[in-house]
Image (cartoon, rainbow, N blue to C red):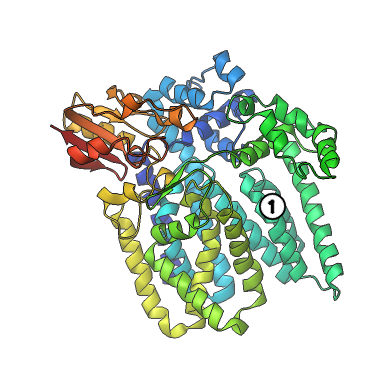
Amino acid sequence: MKLKYFAIIVLLFSFFGLTLTSSVSESPVTDEPGHISTGLLYLKYGDLTFNSGSPLLANILSALPLYTMSSLTIPMDVQYFQNGYLHSFAKDFFMMNKARVDQILLLSRLPIMLAGMLLGLVIFIWTKNWYGFFPALLALGLYVGEPSFLAHAHYATTDVLFALMFTTTIFFLERYLSQKRNYYLFLFAALFALSQLVKITAIFLYPLCFLIFAMYSRKADVLEKIFEATRRVFVLAVFSLLAINSFYGFRDIGLPLSYYLARDQSIINSQYSMSLIESNLPFGQTKFAAVSKYIYYRLPLPVSYQYVKTLGWVFFRSKIPQPSFLAGRYSTTGWKLYFPVLAVLKMPLGLLLFVFASLFLALTKTKHIEKKEHAFLIIPVALSTAGLIFSRINTGYRLLLFLLPLSIIFAVRFVFKEKKFSSVMFVVMLVQLIVTVTNFPNFLGYVNLIPVRDKYKYMSDSNLDWGQDVKKLSLYLKDNKIDTIHMNLFGVMDTELYGQHYEEFGPSWIRDWIGKANGSEDCQDKGAGLYAVSANQLSGTFFQTHDCFNWLLNKGKLTNIIGSSIYIFRYD
């Protein structure tokens, strides 16, 4: 018995050890400076200027360990706050504190590492409750061997924390509906509300809980089931509104939507406009247009402006072109096969085998699927995946992370139902763990069966290159005494953060991403020399000229790859 639980401890602390040691070797990824600096800005001054993209709970948790570091400098130039320049504010925060950048990163990432460990424990407990100890151990092993979780669990971003909140919310809902104990109901409601403060994707929980409540209703009539489910979800919505408004200090409540969006400087300064907002109002030119305009211009909203600001930022971001790239395909409007294809490329083959085996079993032996498996595993994954498939925001596998814990639990269902394959599946899990560890510390760039040198041809953004290898590049340049190199790197930070300045060349990903065309001169042959270019730049995902670096790929010699995302070329 003790040996069995020792295996759990080993797996959980292996997860923590791998994330911790990977963190030490990596630089801030693209989204981290914004999350960390805005969280600290709120803790220190209560300032919500840069509250956009996601609610601030994850940012605040990441910034909490930094709160007592009195010597940290926070940039307070009025231009940042008047114009909503988040990237500039976040970059300057790190540059002003670059002497302590490693300490800042480690401390701000620790809460997310702990959240990753806790998520593994929740997966184990849930699976053990349903299928027993050994399937639960298998599920935990598959989770620990998932490279994308190992990657994102050491970044101070929202994805892993939201995966924990989403999974735990569904878990306590299942506990309450199966055991009818009030403390499970309280935990479910509290986590449901807190999830809304981590990521806007938590809105998926409303239709999910409605369907689950309807399935578990004891009412005989369908309309009565719907009414009961609606009533319960309404109570959850009220509870969530109370939590959201409390979190934002009950500031700016009871104002119409038009006021919220017209006030939002970050929307005005971006590619959004009030005409775009009004053109996307529901009902358009139909007879209901007057109702839509009344809601927009007159109806007071019972929620804080800050939350509506975040919701509006996400909604209108989905209405403008979003550059994405996968397997040679470029898109700015989304691709319905993006996430299915990406899952095949990024999900470890062992877990992929488990998922397909369990799915095959479910389709061929449907009568063996229990009600709880439908309600708490199949429906949440299917409904949320459908929502992502029809989204225009194709920015990476990380958007699927919140569904992977439920997928892992569903996957080990196969072992529970087909016990004769248990030994084989444990071997598969061990092989997956070994393969994952061989990718240490470059977990973010994990891709099935594609050589490192070719990965940029298949994917980009947070699937491969999120600016995580700048620190490794800096160490490489120091170790090899390289004084002159041309660089074009993706991300908010560059080697200047680590005390080195090198010549930049070519187009800027931030400039081109916000719609300003890169001049043709940016893509011209730059002549002989040593070059460091990020995978995103080579793929051309964020450039209007996608083949901008073909001259270097065709004439240069690849001499090294730093981590999984920075390519070193010598061009003679």
Q: Position of residue 120 (x, y in %)?
A: 50, 59
The quadrant in which residue 503 appears is top left
Q: Position of residue 434 (x, y in %)?
A: 31, 62
Q: Is residue 365 above or below residue 487?
A: below
Locate the C terminus and report the quarter of the image it occupies. Answer: top left
Q: Is residue 459 above or below residue 370?
A: above
| Residue 166 in view, yes or no | yes
Asked whether, in this view, residue 292 is left or right of residue 25, the answer is: right
Residue drawn at x 35%, y 45% is 21
The quadrant in which residue 15 appears is bottom left
Q: Is residue 139 above or below residue 26?
A: below
Residue drawn at x 30%, y 56% is 450
Asked whether, in this view, residue 215 is left or right of residue 427, the answer is: right
Q: Nearer the viewer, residue 294 or 55?
A: 294
| Residue 248 in view, yes or no | no
Q: Position of residue 92 (x, y in %)?
A: 46, 21
Q: Which residue is mark 1?
A: 192
Q: Position of residue 382 (x, y in %)?
A: 60, 64
